[in-house]
Image: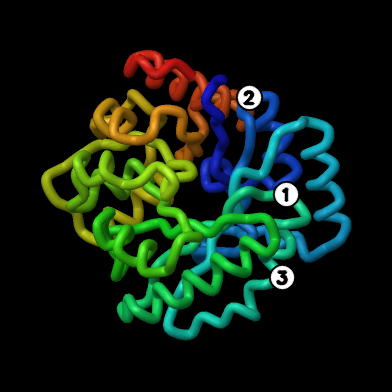
Amino acid sequence: MSRKLSVAHLTAIDLAPAALIRVAAEAGFDGVGLRLLQVTPDSPGYPLSDHTELRETRKALRDTGIEVADIEFLRLTPEFRLAEVLPTLDTGAELAARHVIAAPYDSDLSRLADRLAALAEAAEDRGLRAVLEFFPWTPVPDLAACRQVVEAAGPLPGLLVDSLHFDRSASTFAELAAVPKERLPFAHLCDALVQPRYTEEELLDTARRERLPPGEGEIALTNLLRSLPRDIPLGLEIPGPLRGGETHRDRLQRIHGAALMELKKVGLGS
């Protein structure tokens, strides 16, 4: 069975969900990640609260046959209230999404784990699995801290590794290889240039605007891919500009092809 490849919404964030789904399918992807909630003031979110937009999105899924790999993302802050995000989970369920991504913005890790556990239960009730993603600029800055919180939250939540954040953190390949397979339902893949140290501004700018397709940067993707479960689905999260006169379809085709080439180079096929 070939490995599933999806494209994260941030890769083409100016496309509404229905348009992203159709372009992703034309580019060869098996699925998409949808950003239902706005993350930053200069980047849109698409809550699909309008019935027409939701209907168009569901039709695009039916027409193309691809899936919603994940919806994103829920900030687990000290003020987080589960009841406030249930409509987002309900929308994810209507789209038959597989996962919901949570981000750790609470320095009280015990409370964070409790909130993640509650989110995971609510997600499971709707057919989704909650995953916690770590970011170097948050209270959960690396793989070890993320695994600690996820395991404290019980058996339901998973752990999301993004190649960029893994590279920028103190995480090791040995730690990654030791994570139980059942905690790693999918991973995010991209490339980027590497430097000895980073300011928080540099971390954020690259993460949100300046990633590269696999093979075009300096991240040790071979080691990363070999440390992950062999057939783990991959989401390509690669925000960046269109090149020359290319369209969004052209760019997504280029990214899809780069991912396949990287997997072939590593000896993991597609």
Answer with mark 1 or mark 2, whichever residue precedes in sequence: 2
Q: Nearer the viewer, residue 220 or 22?
A: 220
User: Mark 3: which amino acid?
Assistant: Pro
In the rendered structure, which amino acid carries the disc numbered 1? Ala
Residue at the bottom extreme, as displayed: 79
Q: Position of residue 82 (x, y in %)?
A: 59, 78
Q: Tag 2, which secondary structure?
A: helix
State left or right for residue 104 relative to residue 40.
left
Give the answer, above or below, for where 51 lies relative to 18.
below
Question: For residue 268, what is the image quadrant?
Answer: top left
Q: Alpha-carbon neighbours of circle 3 within 10 Å: few (<14), some, or many (≥20)?
A: few
Q: Estimate how packed mark 1 is, as few (under 14), some (14 to 19) or many (20 or more) residues with alpha carbons within 10 Å.
A: some
Query: Does the CB distance between marks 1 and 2 fall below 8 Å?
Result: no
Mark positioned earlier in the residue sequence (1 or 3): 3
Q: Quick one: label 2 or label 3, which is nearer the N terminus? A: 2
Residue 78 is left or right of residue 121, and the answer is left
* Residue 25 point in image, percent of width and height: 69, 28
Tell me which residue sits at (82%, 54%) in the image.
53
Residue drawn at x 42%, y 50% as measured from the top left:
183
Q: Mark 3 — residue? A: 87
Residue 196, percent from left and from top: 11, 45
Q: Residue at x 32, y 60 (%)?
A: 146
Between the C-alphas of marks 2 and 3, the distance is 31 Å
Place of residue 75 in the rendered image (x, y in percent of width and height, measured from the top left): 48, 70
Label number found at residue 96: 1
What is the distance, in whole Å, between disc 1 and disc 3 at their CAs? 14 Å
Relative to residue 75, is residue 241 depicted above or below? Answer: above
Distance CA(mark 1)–CA(mark 2): 21 Å
Do callouts 2 and 3 mark residues in contact (Cβ within 8 Å)?
A: no
The residue identified by callout 2 is: 27
Q: Is residue 260 left or right of residue 229?
A: right
Secondary structure of residue under mark 3: helix
